[in-house]
Image: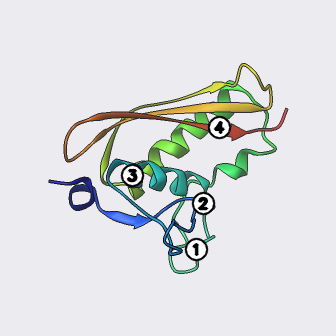
């Protein structure tokens, strides 16, 4: 079975135009990775017809880069992905201070694809305050 039928298909993220001049689409594991990015980057109440959608990680922009803040980000990521991305099963979410930027953290999200139990990992940078 191909990834499009197994995992679905959706508009690519970030939205872009394909070689044929039409909106580009993604499918399979790529679509899931892109949807994780969409969930994490969408602010709550940003979507009028789905106001509770998204993790809203931008809310931490002016928060201090402390253990407590990073724990809140871990919790927010975990709850949002469990709610909004049923094609994955979270294995682990960790948020550590970015060693190259004191005002950023790196979230590492480990998950399994529900349909195949294949393990995947994605890293996301989260900008913070001081």
Secondary structure at badge 2 equals: loop
Q: Tell me, yes or no, whether the two marked residues, 2 and 1, touch with CB atoms within 8 Å.
A: yes
- Residue farthest right in this picture: 130
Judge from the rendering whether residue 25 lies leftward or rightward of residue 45; answer left or right: left
Q: Which residue is mark 4?
A: 125
Q: Which quadrant of the rendered structure holds the C terminus?
A: top right
Q: Which residue is mark 3?
A: 32
As drawn, the label of residue 47 is 1
- Bin the neighbour count of mark 4 within 10 Å (Cα to Cα): few under 14, some 14-19, many 20 and up: some
- Residue farthest top in this picture: 99
Spatial CA distance of label 2 from label 1 is 8 Å
Residue at 60% over, 64% down: 44
As drawn, the label of residue 129 is none
Spatial CA distance of label 1 from label 4 is 23 Å
Residue at 65% over, 37% down: 125
Secondary structure at badge 4 equals: strand
Of the image marks 2 and 4, the number of the one nearer the N terminus: 2
As drawn, the label of residue 42 is 2
């Amino acid at each position: 079975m191909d990834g499009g039928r197994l995992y679905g298909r959706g508009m690519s993220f970030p939205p872009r135009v394909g070689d044929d001049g039409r909106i580009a689409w993604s499918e399979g594991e790529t679509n899931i990775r892109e949807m994780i990015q969409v969930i994490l980057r969408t602010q709550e109440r940003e979507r009028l017809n789905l106001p509770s959608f998204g993790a809203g990680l931008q809310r931490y922009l002016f928060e201090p880069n402390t253990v407590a803040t990073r724990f809140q980000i871990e919790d927010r990521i975990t709850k949002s992905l469990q709610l909004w991305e049923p094609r994955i099963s979270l294995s682990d979410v960790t948020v550590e201070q970015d060693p190259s930027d004191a005002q950023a953290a790196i979230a590492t999200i480990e998950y399994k694809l529900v349909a195949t139990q294949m393990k995947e990992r994605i890293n996301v940078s989260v900008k913070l305050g001081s």
